Amino acid sequence: MKLNRTAQRTVEILKMVSKNPEGTTLDEICKELAMPKTSAYDIVTTLAEMGMVNVDRGARQRYTIGLAAYRIGINYRNNLDFIGVIEPELRAFAKKVGKTVFFGVRSDHEVVYICKSEPENPIITTATVGSKNPMYCTSLGKVILAYSDEETRRQVIGRIKFRRKTEKTIMDQESLEAELDKVRKQGYALDARELEEHMECVGAPVFGADGNVLGALSVSSLYKPTEDYEGLGRVVADKALELSKLLGYIE
């Protein structure tokens, strides 16, 4: 893969600046990174304008790491923290319900699986950590969409290209919006064999400390006509609320 030279230099400058709390001069950046002064100046000026670096305008301008870069780092740390919190909870929950458990988040108009825990005798599922699926035919995607703000929901639905996965797949916006209304009323979503004919999944929303939907918890199993999926939905919703509270959410 060919790397973009400007992007590469930008990252190198940020790394260098972040290591020196006393500040770094333009000459030092050029010397250390073997970079033309005009190129380095254009990059640091842009970074300063975006708040990624601060400029100390003394006898010689020195650059220190900016608040915007700090906030990005904090967000990364917080993401690691929340995964560290939920992973042991998912393992225990998978063991308790005897089914495969996922945690997923929205990625544009799809849902991406970022955690997966299996019981002792797991079933085979096509979803793996890092894989993506459509939002309109997964319990994770539907519940995230249902609890997103109206503007986000409108934009995401507008980008969906409905494709039939099984005979039960939702195939239009009107049907999806009716389904999302139902999800909000009951507090959980069902993937009633809409993605895979032999699989039934139940999902519920997980909220962050700011009250916004962070992602969703789901339980997946082979479809059984005798399974009480509404009862399982309530169990998953209770666990999702428990996870939300662990992450700082207040009802």
Image (tube, grey):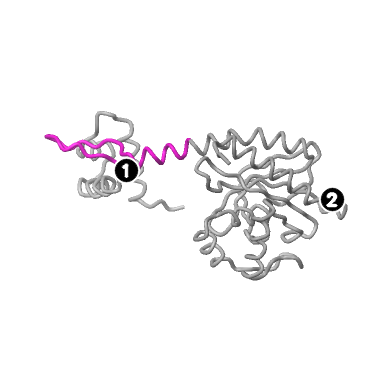
The residue at 49%/61% (across/down) is: 151
Q: Position of residue 191 (x, y in %)?
A: 72, 57
What label sits on residue 52 in the rendered view?
Answer: 1
Q: Residue 16 in the image: x percent, y percent?
A: 31, 35
Determine the secondary structure under disc 2: loop
Q: Is residue 77 left or right of residue 85?
A: left
Q: Amino acid at mark 1?
A: Met
In the image, residue 16 above or below residue 236: above
Q: Which residues are magenta?
A: 52-77
Q: Is residue 223 left or right of residue 94?
A: right
Q: What residue is at 33 percent from the left and 45 percent from the top?
A: 10
* Front residue of this view, candidates 161 and 17: 161
Between disc 2 and disc 1, whose residue precedes?
1
Q: Is residue 59 magenta?
A: yes
**Closer-to-camera residue (48/43):** 48
Mark 1 is surrounded, within 10 Å at the Cα level, by few (under 14), some (14 to 19) or many (20 or more) other residues, namely many
* Quarter of the figure with residue 206: top right
Numbered mark located on residue 132 in the image: none
The amino acid on which the numbered mark 2 sits, given as a three-letter code, is Glu
Q: Residue at x 79, y 36 (%)?
A: 120
Distance of mark 2 from mark 1, alpha carbons?
Answer: 53 Å
Q: Is residue 98 left or right of residue 67?
A: right
Is disc 2 surrounded by few (<14), some (14 to 19) or many (20+) residues within 10 Å? Answer: few
